[in-house]
Amino acid sequence: MNELRTLQKTNFEKSLSSTALCSSKTTTVHSLIISRLPEHNKPLAKAAVHHFNKPGKLLRSKMAMQGAEILNVNHAAALRWAAAVEVLHNASLIHDDICDGDTQRRGQQAVWTKFGRNVALTLGDWLIALAFEFASEAAEISNTPRLLKILAQHMSRTTAGEAMEFEWDGGLNWNTYLTIAADKTAPLLTAPLQGIAVMAGDHKTEQPISAYFRDLGEAYQISNDISNFYGSDGAKLIAGDLARRAPNAVTLSYVDDLNDEDKTSFKNWYRSGDTNDLSKWCRRIIDSPAIKTASNRMFSTLNRAARKASHLPVEISKVATPVHGLILQTCTAASNNKNA
């Protein structure tokens, strides 16, 4: 937090508290998604209604719709692109909950908890198909066939990030961690504005958009890691990442600060997969400077993103600013041990 306070205030940073994403248009996006879910008494209908009963912040929809308004993109095409990204994001959440064993999602039972793993798996698959259906409609309306490739590439990268986590060998390596963190989160934050920019014919901003949201994704993942140690991330277990040996910025920060003897002891326990001493190591990590160190890295990454945002076109920056503000709020809440 000290580093955050000492930053020079850029125009971008000064506007964080004063800009908000309009939610009215996302109501239309959500209604469109609901209208395309499986019909009553059809397979997956109950599970789909349950999941979308709590739609979340609809952040990606808001970005796409506001970006479309600013860049004068066809409303019907933008609406379907917003739905495509939002639905793909929700498919990833349903699958993530299965993989991570998280029993809660948005304050209610996760789909796999309420309806079983098989239903959750197939609902996630079905939603991926629906996402590409929406994307194809957006591509047809806007005469922008590349939208399908964009969505496929972002889905591929998100999936690869998840797969890297499953193959994590306990090496406690920052480079691998940062790749996983960014790949899991950044693609579906990048997609809304990238697709809108392409429909608007602005191809030069694709790389800056991607670089900016990659930093935001990294910071957001670290905030989740911090919340995991406090049990405020919706997981079924406090320090669940430590228990299942999942990559976590707090764990890595802890290891970095250990002397050689303690580092060897922790690494031997970590690689063994044993959970008998989980509470002991969890308490040691919480009592150490590791969470503060991870917080400093998180805010440093946010600051780097803010500097990149200052180089975005004004139109894109108008949409990115409130997104940055929301993620800053989430990171600050995690750092202060509050529910974001």
Image (cartoon, grey):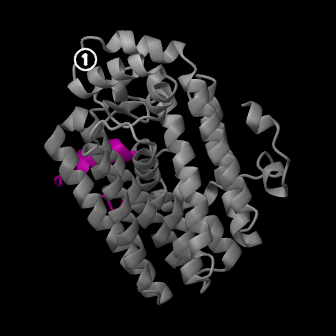
Report which residue position mark 1 lands on.
Answer: 275
- Quadrant of residue 96 within the rendered picture: top left
Foreground of the two, 156 or 293: 293
**187 falls in the magenta region:** no
Q: Residue furthest bottom?
A: 143
Amino acid marked by disc 1: Thr
Q: For the point 29% across and 59% down, which residue is it?
A: 127
The percent position of residue 304, horizontal first and vertical second, equals 68, 52
The percent position of residue 61, horizontal first and vertical second, equals 53, 60
Q: Secondary structure at mark 1?
A: loop
Relative to 10, say whether 72 is above or below.
below
Q: For the point 49% across and 66% down, which residue is it?
A: 191
Specify the quadrant that holds the N terminus: top right
Query: Is residue 275 toward the left or the right of residue 75 in the image?
Result: left
The percent position of residue 146, horizontal first and vertical second, equals 43, 83
What residue span does the magenta drawing correspond to?
Answer: 35-52
